[in-house]
Amino acid sequence: MAPLTPRLVVPIDVKKKPWEQKVRLHNRWHPDIPPVADVTEGELFRVEMVDWTGGRVRDDDSADDIKFLDLTITHYLSGPLRIVDAEGVPASPGDLLAVEICNLGPLPGDEWGYTGIFERENGGGFLTDHFPSARKAIWYFEGIYAYSPQIPGVRFPGLTHPGIVGTAPSVELLNIWNERERKLIETGHESLKLCEVLHQRPLANLPTSDNCLLGKIQEGTAEWQKIANEAARTIPGRENGGNCDIKNLSRGSKVYLPVFVEGANLSTGDMHFSQGDGEVSFCGAIEMSGFLELKCEIIRGGMKEYLTPVGPTALHVNPIFEIGPVEPRFSEWLVFEGISVDESGKQHFLDASVAYKRAVLNAIEYLSRFGYSKEQVYLLLSCCPCEGRISGIVDAPNAVATLAIPTAIFDQVSCNSPTNCFLDILKDVHFIYCCAFFHVLNKNRRTRL
Amino acid sequence: MAPLTPRLVVPIDVKKKPWEQKVRLHNRWHPDIPPVADVTEGELFRVEMVDWTGGRVRDDDSADDIKFLDLTITHYLSGPLRIVDAEGVPASPGDLLAVEICNLGPLPGDEWGYTGIFERENGGGFLTDHFPSARKAIWYFEGIYAYSPQIPGVRFPGLTHPGIVGTAPSVELLNIWNERERKLIETGHESLKLCEVLHQRPLANLPTSDNCLLGKIQEGTAEWQKIANEAARTIPGRENGGNCDIKNLSRGSKVYLPVFVEGANLSTGDMHFSQGDGEVSFCGAIEMSGFLELKCEIIRGGMKEYLTPVGPTALHVNPIFEIGPVEPRFSEWLVFEGISVDESGKQHFLDASVAYKRAVLNAIEYLSRFGYSKEQVYLLLSCCPCEGRISGIVDAPNAVATLAIPTAIFDQVSCNSPTNCFLDILKDVHFIYCCAFFHVLNKNRRTRL
Amino acid sequence: MAPLTPRLVVPIDVKKKPWEQKVRLHNRWHPDIPPVADVTEGELFRVEMVDWTGGRVRDDDSADDIKFLDLTITHYLSGPLRIVDAEGVPASPGDLLAVEICNLGPLPGDEWGYTGIFERENGGGFLTDHFPSARKAIWYFEGIYAYSPQIPGVRFPGLTHPGIVGTAPSVELLNIWNERERKLIETGHESLKLCEVLHQRPLANLPTSDNCLLGKIQEGTAEWQKIANEAARTIPGRENGGNCDIKNLSRGSKVYLPVFVEGANLSTGDMHFSQGDGEVSFCGAIEMSGFLELKCEIIRGGMKEYLTPVGPTALHVNPIFEIGPVEPRFSEWLVFEGISVDESGKQHFLDASVAYKRAVLNAIEYLSRFGYSKEQVYLLLSCCPCEGRISGIVDAPNAVATLAIPTAIFDQVSCNSPTNCFLDILKDVHFIYCCAFFHVLNKNRRTRL
Amino acid sequence: MAPLTPRLVVPIDVKKKPWEQKVRLHNRWHPDIPPVADVTEGELFRVEMVDWTGGRVRDDDSADDIKFLDLTITHYLSGPLRIVDAEGVPASPGDLLAVEICNLGPLPGDEWGYTGIFERENGGGFLTDHFPSARKAIWYFEGIYAYSPQIPGVRFPGLTHPGIVGTAPSVELLNIWNERERKLIETGHESLKLCEVLHQRPLANLPTSDNCLLGKIQEGTAEWQKIANEAARTIPGRENGGNCDIKNLSRGSKVYLPVFVEGANLSTGDMHFSQGDGEVSFCGAIEMSGFLELKCEIIRGGMKEYLTPVGPTALHVNPIFEIGPVEPRFSEWLVFEGISVDESGKQHFLDASVAYKRAVLNAIEYLSRFGYSKEQVYLLLSCCPCEGRISGIVDAPNAVATLAIPTAIFDQVSCNSPTNCFLDILKDVHFIYCCAFFHVLNKNRRTRL
C-alpha cells in the first residue's frame, strides 16, 4: 500500500490574512528566509496558496480595489520548502531540482478569480497608454470552465498554472539582481527606447522593508530589517524562475530549476486559473488562490551538466521545462499580426515587444466591433488561452508578432446566464455566440433569444 | 462537372533564371508593376515560385554561396495577380482579399531545400554576434518529411508555407514605408538600443535600382527607372502582408489581406518547407522553390469593416488569418526560457527580443551538449517547427520569452541513413536518439540503470 | 456574487458501507426508486460516489477479492436526482436532459483504484477463454497520473469518466428491457453465434431481489419486494444511458439523456480514473470512488425533437454527447489490426466483435514479448487510454477492427519507483522504456548499432 | 547530392483502361503474379493507381453506373513490387516489410472522387436493409479540401489513404483463405446470426476467372487459367493486409506487413481521398485514382520476432502500423451511441456490429432533421473523417459502439457554391452553417443570405 493522498505541507485558510496563516508566508526572495518544511525527493505533497494580493481584491462590481491596490505588497508566496533526498541530504547549490506539477486547481470553497487593469499611475500594464483607467472582471468557475458577468458570451476551460515557481537565490545572485535593476532605474527614462512605447511604471522595484513579510522571521527584528533591505521583490521572473507567468506550466508539466542554496528553498504562489501569453493587462491572469500537488527530484550536479550559463557568471542561467499532456485542445484559431511600427507610425528595429503590442491592439480593435468595449477585450486577451508568438525576428527592420485566439472561447451558454442584462447592447455578439455551435441545442436556443 | 484541376497562372522552370521565366517575376513592391494574369473570385488557381534567391544556392556541401550571396537581390516573387469578381469587377482599395491556401508543396523534380547562416558582414541574423560565419545545411524531402546530411539524427514533417503573401501598396502607403525606414537609418546606430544586442546589418534596405526586376517592364526604360527608385524592398513584412515569415500560414489557412490598389495585385514567393518561429538565422527556413494552390474571395468594403487602423493613417493596418486544420501534431515539447537580461548581464526593460534571444541561446547551449555543434543547432532551431512565445511582457523589468521544441523531431531512423559517417563523433547523440526522451534526465538516468 | 462552490447533494464516506451512507444509494434501475434530492436547472452541484463494488476490493497484492466477488451486487449508484427548472417544474417524459460534466476526480483521501480480471466462472470478460483466472492491479494516483506496482514501466494521465450516467426508465421501458433480455437467455447458448467466441457468462442478468439496494426504501417491505422483482440490473448500457463505459465522457463533455419519468431521476456511479475502449477485462477500468460536478439543462420536448427512435417504440432511443476539450493529448500511436477470423481459423461474417478480439489478442502477444506477462498486458489494455475502432465493416466477409495504443503510456520514470523488484525479469522492458520508441524496430535497430 | 524525386515505378494514364496501362495492373492475390519492378530498401519510389473500378464511375449526376457496376471486377492494383535489400537480396518469407507512406494524393489532372451506395441486389452495404437503392455523390478537391454538389454545406480536409496495401500470399496462405471463405458460404445463411442484421450479399467472393487481370500474364493461357482459378478476390482485408480500408493509414504512417513470398510482392490500390471508420455504404470512401510515395525497409526474421500468430498456423497474423503526424485536427465532436439491440427491438449478445449499426442509424436520423435526406447523410458518414469506436464490449448483453462526427465538416463556404439550388429546402441547415464560424466573414455572409 502506498500513501494515497499528497501530504499537505502548506495549508491556507482564505478567511485569514497572509500573516495570520498557520504556516507563515513570505513576499521576498532571499537566501535567509527559513524553510517552513522539509520535503523528500519522490514524495507527493500539496502546497496551498493565497491569491497574489492575499485577499485584497473583492468579488464585486467595483474596480476601486484594483485602482488603489498597494503594489508594494506583492506576491505572497508559500514556502520555502527544503528539498532533501531519501537519505535526508538536502539539494545543494549546483544541483537541478525537477518539479513535476501532478495536479493543481482552485481551493475548494473559493472557486472564483479576477482579472484587472491597473491604473496608469499605479502599476499600469502593456497597453497603459491606451487604457489608463482601472477595470475589473470577476470570473466564476464551473469545474474546468470560467465565465465572467463582466464579459458575457465567453466561457473557456482554464490552462491553470502557478505564476510563480522558484528557488531561493544565493547572496551572490541576489547582489547581481539588485545591481542590474538599480542600474536600469538610474539610467533613467531618457535612454530607454521602449519607454516611448511601454508606459508601465516604475521601471523596476528595488528592495524595501515596506510591507515586507518574511515567514517566521519577526517583523522589526534586526534580522528582519537586514533581510528586508536586501531581499529581491517578486515581480519579474529571473534566473531562479520566479514570476515567469508562463501559461503552459500546467498540469503534468515538469520544470527544472537551478539550485542556489542548500535545500533549494522552493517557493510557489500567484495561481492563475488561466492566462494569455504576455498577461498583457499586468493583473491580467484570472488571479486566484489555489493548490499545487508536486513531486520533486534532485539531479545532483545538474546545473553544470544541463544549464549552460549565458552571461558573466555561472549563475546566469534559466530554467527549462516540459509541457504536460492535458492542455485544453483548440482547433480553430483567429490570428492577428503586428509589426514593429508603433501607433505613431514610427519604425522600430526588430522590436518584438512593439510588434506584439500592435498585434494585441489589432485584436482589441477587431473584437470590439462585435459589441464588446475595448476594455472588455483587453481583459479577455490577458486571461484567455491566447498564444503570443514571435513569428519573424530577422526581417529588418520589422519584427512580426502574432496573437492567436481560439474561437471556441466564445460560447453561447452564457446566453442564459445572469448576464442577460447585456443582451441589448450585445445583440450582434450574441447572434454569433448563439449560432456558433452545431449541436442539439442550437435550434432551441435560437427560438428563445 | 467542375474543372478538376487548378488553373496554372504562373509556371516556373527551375532550370531557368528568374528573368527568363515565361511569366516574368518581380522583386519589389510597387503599385505600377503590371499584373501578369487575372484571377476570378472563387476560382482555384496555381502559382509556382522559384526559391527566394532564384536558384543561387546550390545543393552541395560548401557554404560559399551563402557567404557571398548578393543580398541586394531578394526576393523573387510570382505575380502580381489581378483579382476580379464573377462580373469581372476588380477588387478595389478598401476591400479585403481573403486568400485560402488550399494546397502547397515543393515543385515536382525539385524536392530539396537549404538553411543558411549569413556572414556577419553580409546579412547577419538574430545571433550574428555569436555566429559570425556562413554555414549551410541541405535538406532532402521524403514526402512530408525532411532530413539533412549536415544535421544527422533529425527528421521532421514540414509545416510548409509561403514566407511572402502580399498585395501591392498604393503610392501613399509606399511613401509611408520609404519615409519611416529612411528615418530609421538616419537616426543612426547610436540611438537604437537593440543595436547593442541585435547586430544584424543594415538596419533597413531602401529603394535601389540595383538588380531590380519588375516583371514585364523592361530594365533600363524610364518607367523601370522611376519604379525602381520608388519601389519597396521585400525583406520586412509590412501593412500589405509581405515577408511576414509566419510558419502557421500553411495548408488550409486563410489570410485576409487589405487591398490598396485596383485588382489587389497579389504576389507570393519565398516558399518554406518548414520554419521555426522567428526564423532566427535569417536564411533560416528550409528555403525552396514550390507551388501554391489558392482561392480568393473579395469582401467588398472589408478593410473598413474588419481592419481598424492603428496608426496615423487609414492604411496602418495588418492582415488577419485563420490557421488550417492539418498542421503536424506534436505532444511532447521541451521548453527553454529567456529573460530580458542580455549576455553581458545587462538589464533591459520588458524587451521581448532580448528575452527571446536568451531563450534561443539557452536552447543552443543545451542541445549542443548532445553532440551537435552550436552552428548545427542554430540552423536547426531556425527551420524546425519550434514555437517562440512571448510568455510574460508586463513583469517589469523582465520580459519572459519561451522557445518550445517538439522532441519528436529527433529521430532514430537516420541511424541507418547515409549519415553513418557521422556516427563516430556523434556517439552520444545517437545514444540519445535511440532513447528518444530527449530531456535533461536522460543522461542522469542512464548512469543509474 | 455567485455561489462559489458546487452544492454537495450526495456525500460519500468511503469508510462506511454503501447502505450506511448518509444519503442512501441504490443498485437497480426502476421508476419507483425515490429521488434523494432536487437539483435546479443551471445549478452547479456535486455528487460523490463509492466505487462500483462499494469498497469490496482491497488495496493489496491478492486477487482473491476479485476472484470471489459476489457479482449479484453491482453497481452502487448515487441518486436518483430529481431535476427541476427555475420555476420548480420537473423534467417530464419526452424532455431531453443535458448534463454537463464540469469536473470530476477521485475522492480526496482515497486516491487509488484497481483493475481486475474476473474468474472464468465468475463474470469472465472479453478474453475469458484465454485468461480464465482472476488477477488484480492496484493503481496509485499522482494528480493526473496513475501508476501500478503490478505493471511497472507504465504511467499515464487519466481520461477520467463515470462509467454510469443515466435516467430512470419508465415502467414501459423497463418491461421492454426485461422482456428482451429474458428472451436472450431463453434462446440459449446454442443459437448464439458469438458464444463460440465470447465466453462471458451469464448472457444477461435478470431482476432479482438478492442484494438489492433501493435507496430510502426499506429492505423486506412489500414495496421493496415489488420493485426488486421488476428492477433492471445495472450491467449493460441501455436506452437511458446507464453503464455505457464510454471513456470519452470526461471533463467538459455534455451528454443529452432522454427523460422517461417525471424529474428525470438522474443517477451516476462506477467512476473510472481511466479506461481503454471496450474495457476488455470487464472489471477493466481503473475502478475508484470519486466525485462529479454537474450542471443540467432541461430541453423541453427534446426527445421528440432530437432523438429519433430506431426500433419498435418511441422509447428505442440512445443518448448523444459532445466530447470535452481537455482529453489527454497523444501524438504517437502503435496500432494493431484484427479481422473477423477467430483463433480456430474460422471465418466469421463481418463480425466486429471477433475482429476486435483479434486486434486485442495481437496487441497482447506483441507487448508480452517485451517482458510483460500476458495478464499484465490484458489488464493494461483494459484501462489505459487505448482506442478501439471499427475500421472496415463492409468488406465481406471480414470486418477489420483496430486497437491503437498511445506509446507515451510507457514511461521510464518508474525505473526508479518502488517496483524495482521487477527489474530483473523486466530487463528487456526497461531497455525499451528508456528507448521509448516502443515499436517493432527497436530491438532490431539496437542490435545493428 | 541525393536523388531529389521519388522514382516512378508504376505510371498511370487515367485516360486508358486498366489493361491498357504501360505497367500492367492486376486484380487478384496470388503468389505467381509476376512482379512489375524491383524496389530497393531505403529508396523513395512512387506508385500511381487507378481508382478501384478502373474508371467505370463517371463524374455526373446519375447513379446508374453505381447501380449496374459489375462487382466481379474489383479492385485494380498496382504492383506487385519485388523488394530487395541494398545487396539485391529479396525479402524472404518470415521477414517483416516496413512500408512508410511518405506522401500520397490524387493524380494531377484527376482531382475528383465519388461515394456510392450500392443497390441492395448488387453489393449492398452496412445499411442495405434501410437504403436499398443506388446513390452517388461526386466530390471535387480543392487541395486538402473536398466538397460535393450532392451534399451541400459540407467541406472537409481529407484523411487520404490507400484502401489496399498488401503483400502476396503464399500458396499455403491462399489455400487457407479459399477454404475458410468457401466454408462460410456453404454454411449458408441460416446459421449466420448477423445475416438477420447485415443484409450485404454475397457473403464472400470465391475465385473466378471472370474479369481476372493478372499483370503480364496473358489472358486465356494455361498459366492464366490456373492462377485465376486459385487467386483470392480482393474485397476483404486478410493476413497480408489487403483491403483493410483503415482511414488512419495516411501521410507519414508506417505499416509493418508480413512477407509470405520471396520479394514480398507488394501491391497497392483503392485510393481514398477520405473515409469514415467502417466505410459504411461499402463504396463509401471518396474513391479516386491517386499516387503513393513509399519507402520500404526489410526487417529480417521480423514476422517471427514481432507478429505472434493467433490461429492454427504460423501464417495467422495481422499487420501492425504507426499513425502519421499530419492527420486533420478536430476539436469538437458530436457523438452518437448505439447498443446491440437491433431495429426490431431484439437483444443481441455483445455484438459490436449491431451496436455500431445502431449508432450510425442514430446519426443519420439526427442529421436528417437539418435538411438533409437520409441518403445524403449515409453517404456523408461513409466518407467524412468520423470515428467509429467500440466503447464497451463486456457489459453483457449490450455492446456499446459510438460514432463521433467532427462538427467542423459543416462549412458555410458552400453557401456560395453552385449548390444554391438546395438553399430553399436547406434553410435550417444553412442557418447553422452560415453562423458556425466566428470569423471576419460572418456578418458579411449573414446579410447576403
Image (cartoon, coloured by chain):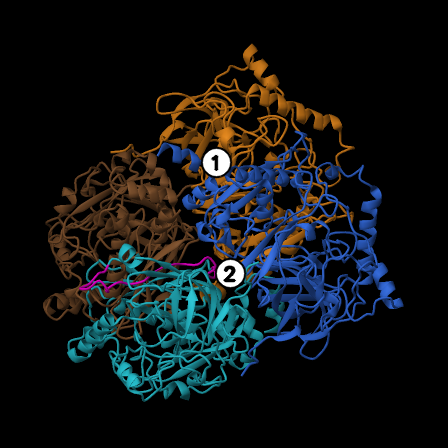
Chain colours: A orange, B blue, C brown, D cyan
Q: Which residues are magenta?
A: D309-329
What chain letter is assigned to the residue under label 1?
A
Image coordinates for residue A383, horizontal then vertical, percent: 56, 44
Q: Amino acid at mark 2?
A: Ile
Residue B166 visible at all: yes
Q: Is residue D200 left or right of residue D284?
A: left
Q: CA distance from mark 2 to mark 1?
A: 32 Å
Residue A403 coordinates in the image, percent (x, y): 61, 51
Instruction: Considering the whole magenta stretch, tell me its main secondary structure.
Output: loop
Residue C371, quarter of the rendered image:
top left
Q: Nearer the viewer, residue A129 or B292?
A: B292
Number of other residues with Cα within 10 Å of mark 1, as a class: few under 14, some 14 to 19, many 20 or more:
many
* Residue bearing mark 1: A255
Q: Nearer the viewer, residue C85 or C401?
A: C401
When the figure is inspected, residue B237 is found, relative to residue C346, above or below; the finding is: above
- Residue most extreme to the front: D87
What is the number of the mark on residue B144? 2
Judged from the image, the secondary structure of the residue bearing numbered disc 1 is strand
Q: Is residue C131 above or below residue D365?
A: above
Q: Amino acid at mark 1?
A: Val
Which element type, helix, strand or loop, lies under badge 2?
A: loop
* Spot occupied by residue B352 in the image (x, y as percentages of width and height): 65, 41
Which residue is pictured at 62% across the width and 42% down the height?
A280
Left or right for B308, reference A45: right
Dot 2 surroundings within 10 Å: few (below 14), some, or many (20 or more)? Answer: many
Q: Is residue C172 magenta?
A: no
Labels 2, 1: one chain: no
Work out whether residue C262 can be spotted.
no
